Image (cartoon, helix red, strand yellow):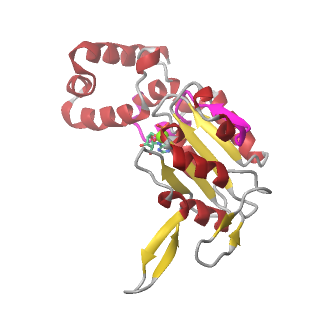
Amino acid sequence: MALMVESDAHVDEVPLAQGWRDFADVLAAGVDRVILYGPPGTGKTFAALHFATLGGAAERLICTEDLTTADVTGTWMPAGHDRWEWLEGPAVRAWRRGGRLVVDEVDRAAGDVLSLLLAMTDTDGSAQWQHPHTGEIVRPAESFTVVMTTNIERLEELPVALRDRFPVAVRIDRPHPASVRRLSADLRRPALSGTLGEEDRRVSLRTFYAFDQLRERHGAERAAHLLFGETRAQAFLDALVIGALER
Ligand SMILES: Nc1ncnc2c1ncn2[C@@H]1O[C@H](COP(=O)(O)OP(=O)(O)O)[C@@H](O)[C@H]1O
Ligand SMILES: [Mg+2]
């Protein structure tokens, strides 16, 4: 990703987490179907949207139980008082453009959307979609890529057929160095190490951003209380101090 960033010894001396290295290697090799999975708040969605997105800005589907097939391939829209036309959805747009389709939180997609996703993420040779109005057969342009993200840990929970379309799944368990540079210097390393908080209650990037913002106005103690509550606030502050001493 093209991000101009100041160098920062504290961040630069932390080796790039394996997951981020894997993701970069996989994209560089031209693999065009990748799953990013792991705990929330590590920058999976951000990376899916911005890393190596040839063909312009990524198209994003956020899967919820309310997402419908119309949100994926498109829907009829009124165009004048007795005319309807098909408005193409993000997946078709990404196909045509040869861009990136990001399927965010894929584990939450409902059954009919999942079936459609099977079709829209199929191998380039097999994938095709027919325009319901013009009958045009659309196929994904060669540079089309899909990155799916999910916070689930067990990929077996995804439908086998969908999983099968994505030969590579990369587990991301730490923030990317670029993401912590937005933080005050003393928070960057703790945020990057991803070890603050117990395994099942890790302090996510979003929480670090909020802590930084609250601390600026209200001081560290109050910020920690607002974010973590009475019982966990002190543990967080202690961990920050220990983190600061370690470096
Ligand atoms: N490389 C980055 N540069 C700047 N901000 C980032 C970067 N990666 C993540 N963020 C920010 O961190 C937050 C969490 O990232 P997100 O991609 O939503 O995480 P996840 O999908 O793993 O839950 C978001 O506010 C996002 O904008
Ligand atoms: Mg996400």
* Residue at point 68%, 75% (across, down): 136
Figure quadrant of residue 163: top right
- Residue 205 position, x and y percent, is 43, 33
Figure quadrant of residue 216: top left
In the image, 82: left or right of 212? Answer: right
* Residue at point 24%, 13% (across, down): 231
State yes or no: residue 168 in magenta.
yes
In the image, 138: left or right of 72? Answer: right
* Residue at point 60%, 37% (across, down): 36
- Residue 32 position, x and y percent, is 72, 49
State yes or no: residue 136 in magenta.
no
- Residue 75 position, x and y percent, is 48, 67
Residue 154 vs residue 228, the one in the foreground: 154
**151 up-or-down from 198: above or below:** below
Bounds of the magenta segment: 164-186
**94 up-or-down from 29: above or below:** below
**143 up-or-down from 122: above or below:** below
Residue 216 vs residue 161, the one in the foreground: 161
